[in-house]
Amino acid sequence: DATIAGIQPDRLAAFAAREAAVYARSRPKAAKAMAAGAGHFLNKVPMHWMADWPMPHLPLVASAKGATLTDIDGVTLDDFCLGDTGSMFGHSPAPVAKAIRAQARHGLTYMLPTETALQAGRLLTDRFGAFQWQIATTATDANRFALRVARAVTGRPKVLVFNGCYHGTVDDTFVSLEDGRTVTSPGLLGQVADLTQTAVCCEFNDLAGVEAALAKGDVAAILTEPVMTNSCMVLPEAGFHDGLRQLSLKYGTLLIMDETHTISSGLGGYTGVHSLRPDIFVVGKCVAGGMPTAVWGLTDETAKRYEEVNANRPSGRSGMGTTLSANPMQFACLVATLDKVMTPANYAHMEKLAARLSHGLAKAIDRHKAPWHVVRVGARVEFICAPGPLHNGAEAAAAHQPQVEAALHTGLLNRGTLIAPFHNMMLVSPATRKRQIDHLIASFDAILSDLFEEA
Ligand code: PMP
């Protein structure tokens, strides 16, 4: 088969060239400003991931509100990227913006709690369950601290992660599977230690593989997302999460659930919706409505073990915490988000429109007989340019079609819609409107006509 994801290569190339030209023509101001002003940044971007977006050059954002974003060239986009989940509840949700204005008059960071902090603690337990909480600033940090606790209380060295996972820039998790063996992930910059000493990698949905790894007795924690969302999305098979819980109990390994993306599932995240029972719960990104904040919580049992270890350790730095974490601005935004934004009514709206989006995309795929599929986890929808369902990280890696995806992303941008880079992920916020969903479906359908239909 000489096609790429079912598309004739020459047709794909012509489409990609046409869309790139349209994009570049429509954003002269951004092109000029970037050429003149980006040179002070390493690699000409403030964060190097930004260089990996697929369009010919970056737009410069002028403003964002709700589920739209406007750039300095005056182009307004329906935003389904939503800061790759940081703004999953919409840009500047009104209660959060109000909380920021109010707190701004009373100081930004003091390394002391506020009354609002106490309220945030109660709300965290209300929303996510009976965990004993800590505040961090990024999900990366929350995962690092959770791992540190797991190693401290078990006295074991390793973390078990799944092939193709992403949990932030936590060094230990950058391992993958090669011919069934754990290896340090290629591409990791400046890695001098052998990560296979402190991590073991298994395939998602492979309970036998997990058991073989745990049986060695050196695994402190399994760190996983409830659904793999960081390559092409992979859903857990029936019984997988039950099996993980049983195995982790059997071998004395802690179970850490990273809900940073699956918070899209509904109230309480995937853990809440599907009654999972992790020992440590982690969520970041959108938990404070876009203010840099993450939380991690321990069950009472895990907290008790932690307190024992902590009470008996020699004096010295614990390796947990960062100076700006648990600041009053984070608490103001946490309370506003948990109380007024992360509501059943908002989740119901997100769920309903995401289902509409997922059905619409699947119908277009069917109509054009594209060998593709769609996956949805609550408010998170992804189209995958390969047949499905996918069962694990190896299949998810093989399903990626970077050339097709880059052309498609640019094509959608030219039709007024931004989706998340690096994969084909779309988020529906409380501010997202039905017409934005229908417009995205129509654009997707029109692009598939260009790519698949005989002229
Ligand atoms: N966990 C998961 C599941 C993620 O997807 C990400 C980021 N994509 C992170 C953690 C890290 O988040 P941050 O970059 O905000 O630290």
Image (spheres, rainbow, N blue to C red):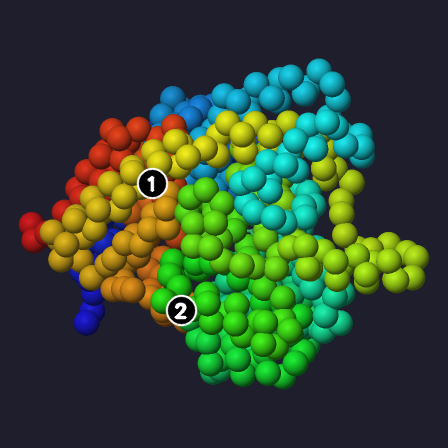
Cα distance in 3D space between marks 2 and 1: 24 Å
Q: Is residue 386 visible?
A: yes
Which residue does the image show at 54% across and 30% down from the upper left?
Answer: 339
Quarter assignment of residue 343: top left
Residue that carries the numbered disc 1 in the rendered image:
351
Q: Is residue 41 visible?
A: no
Q: How crowded is mark 1: few (under 14 residues within 10 Å), some or many (20 or more)?
A: many
Q: In this view, does 140 lie to the left or right of 377?
A: right
User: Where is 177 relative to 255, above or below?
Assistant: below
Number of numbered markers:
2
Packing grade of label 2 (10 A; few <14, some 14-19, many >=20) is: few
Q: Is mark 1 on a helix, strand or loop?
A: helix
Residue 163 x %, y %: 49, 69
Residue 249, image x and y in percent? 59, 72
Quadrant (top left/top right/bottom left/bottom right) for the N terminus:
bottom left
Q: Residue 239 shows which numbered tag? A: 2
From the viewer's side, name the closer residue of 16 and 129: 129
Question: What amino acid does circle 1 point to?
Answer: Glu
Residue at the spot 39% in from the left edge and 31% down from the top edge: 345
Residue located at (25% from left, 29% from top) = 435
Using residue 310 as the reference point, say whether residue 145 is left or right of it: left
| Residue under the point 78% across and 40% down | 323
The amino acid beneath tag 2 is Gly
Q: Which of marks 2 and 1 is in front?
A: 2
> Marks 1 and 2: in contact by CB < 8 Å?
no
Query: In x, y percent, where is residue 420?
Result: 41, 44
